[in-house]
Amino acid sequence: MKSLENTFKKRLLAGETLIGLWSSLCSPIAAEALADAGFDWLLFDSEHSPVEVAGLYPLLQAASSGSAEAIVRPAWNDKVLIKRVLDIGAQTVLVPFVQNAEEARAAVEATRYPPEGIRGVAGSTRASRYGRAKDYFKVANREVCVLVQIETGVALEVLEDIATVDGVDGVFIGPSDLAASLGHLGNPGHENVQRALRVAIDKLKALGKPAGILATNPEDAMRYRNWGYQFVAAGVDLGLLVKAADGLANQMK
């Protein structure tokens, strides 16, 4: 039995544009349903949702039957959290709040077995297909995809340094936290924030580094995609549920 190929990483590095959906419902039922909705990827967020590592496990299992590739955002750029997320089978991680090249390098090292990194070794994990994938330790380092999240004006100032760290496969810009950092809390549509997002993608395109972003509506998602953002979350599952529920309730009143 062989290890699973990270098709998200393969497609990302091949230059494909990949449209995804953000998931914060913490429900295996929702994960299974959304994984077959037609998105290229589905991100399970453990930073801004109440799910812990044990709760991520059934989400990854449920999503594995669908066509969307699973991504996990650990709660923090923490080597222990990253190790545990990888052991339960995540192949792509989005590491939040990376402020400089040193922190980006630490994120990469947390995903790599020695001598390339510091990831601890465990045998029978879901990642190695419970020890049945005999090639796992040989291929794990190259199959892991590391995405780092830029969320502040401080990080934007050293964007090139972060993006060029060896092992960083993509850079994700977080519009909401960036807006707060730039003095526009709750207003990522502000012209100054949008200008910063445009500058960021132009810099990343010049470096040849895949860029990602989160949108909460199709209009923003399409605009970001047209600017050149390569992996774009077009919405959030909880937001879609609330919008649909509110719309139905209002329609019936």
Image: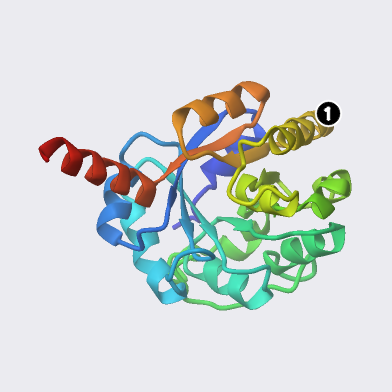
Up/down of 195 relative to 68, above or below: above
The x, y position of residue 1, in whole percent, is 44, 58
In the displayed structure image, the side of residue 32 where residue 89 appears, left or right: right
- Answer few, some or many: residues within 10 Å of disc 1's Cα (few below 14, many 20 plus, some between 14 and 19): few
Task: Name the colour scheme.
Answer: rainbow
Label 1 is placed on what type of residue? Ala
Up/down of 114 relative to 92, above or below: below
Up/down of 93 relative to 218, above or below: below
Up/down of 232 relative to 94, above or below: above
Q: Residue 29 falls in which quadrant of the image?
A: bottom left
The x, y position of residue 52, in whole percent, is 45, 74
- Residue at the image point whose x is 67% and y is 26% from the top: 228
| Front residue of 235 and 81 | 235
Which residue sits furthest left?
252
Q: Quadrant of the C terminus?
A: top left
In the displayed structure image, the side of residue 114 where residue 226 appears, left or right: left
- Residue at the image point whose x is 47% and y is 76% from the top: 124
Which residue sits furthest front?
253
The x, y position of residue 87, in whole percent, is 52, 70
| Front residue of 211 and 89 | 211
State whether residue 42 appears in this view. Answer: yes
| Front residue of 57 and 171 | 171
The x, y position of residue 178, in whole percent, is 69, 49
Q: Residue 244 falls in which quadrant of the image?
A: top left
- Residue at the image point whose x is 64% and y is 31% from the top: 229
- Residue at the image point whose x is 48% and y is 40% from the top: 216
Q: Which residue is mark 1?
A: 206
Q: Element under label 1?
A: helix
